[in-house]
Amino acid sequence: MFNNLTTEARNPMTMNLDEMSISEVLYTMNEEDQGVPKVVKGAIPKIEVLVKEVVQSLKGGGRLIYVGAGTSGRLGVLDAVECPPTFGVPSSTVIGQIAGGDAAFTKAKEGAEDSKEAGQKDLKQLSLTSKDVVIGLAASGRTPYVIGALQYAQTCGAVTGSVSCNVSATVSEYADYSIEVDTGAEVLTGSTRLKAGTAQKLVLNMISTSAMIGVGKIYENLMVDVKATNNKLIQRSHNIIMEATGVDEKTAARAFHQSGQHVKTAIVMILADISETEAKSRLTEANGFIKKAIQEP
């Protein structure tokens, strides 16, 4: 079965990889990479269905949980940890679970992926509920750790999804919504941190970003729930307020301060010409959507 995986196949375009010049290697890799977005595009209808489930989960107080091993697991963690600063959600809302635990993010623990029981155990520790969505990430589509996690998620009534880079992937059998992005043979045989990793990153970008749009974390194309945790982000917050409202920086900075450093509230205060208290009340009633919040009662 392992030999039938396209992610493990030898790429006929790189049989002489060890004899190529550096320039030839780079151009060859670039040429191979160009096909990845096209393959991802073909999976958009299936990605859309899964995203709708994530939106419903988040609206109902559920969580988005990525589960993976190796590169796939690291990509899940990477996407998850970026959600709090970008979208202002708690770190418990989007979770990246990697085989081998946090230490496996910086130091490879390849053997950790071979245990279904470990996948089940790690999810149990998250107190999984039927409100959650669990997405298994496995380039090969056969990782036991991920399969075990999805099996456990199903027993809890959670919605399950999978992202793999082989057709008819085993992991798809354990997912309510399976996304298979066949990126073909890698430039370096079996090195799924390359095209397969790129494809998974693109899919995760789509899932988290579009889901956060669906729960009101975006206004126009601005990240209005950004957390201003450093000087750069404070300046970005000012810029976002200016872009959204057309005011000058002094006005934006004042509203930002009055809002308790909450960009979304500051924008509603300015656009609706109301107090901080009223702005927050309207945002609550509008479930966080600015355009609804600024409409006349």
Image (tube, helix red, strand yellow):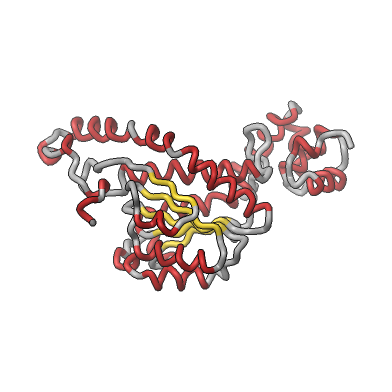
Q: Where, quadrant-wise, is the N terminus in this rendering?
A: bottom left
- Identify the residue at image location x=23%, y=56%: 2
Quadrant of residue 248 in the image?
Answer: top right
The spot of residue 42 in percent (x, y) is 42, 35
User: 164 or 71: which is nearer to us?
Assistant: 164
Seen at 29% across and 32% down, the residue is: 30
Residue in the image at 48% along x and 53% along y? 161
Please state the horizontal and vertical placement of residue 59, each as a whole percent of the image: 68, 52
Q: In this rendered view, identify the residue nearer to me: 279 or 291.
A: 291
Is any atom of residue 140 visible in this view? yes
Residue 258 visible, this orientation: no
- Image spot of residue 89 (x, y percent): 63, 53
* Circle count: 0
Q: Residue reaching furthest top?
A: 246
At a point 78% along the width and 44% down the height, the residue shown is 286
204 left or right, relative to 261: left
Lateral position of residue 32 relative to residue 268, left or right: left
Q: Quadrant of the C terminus?
A: top right
In the image, residue 251 lies at what x, y percent? 78, 33
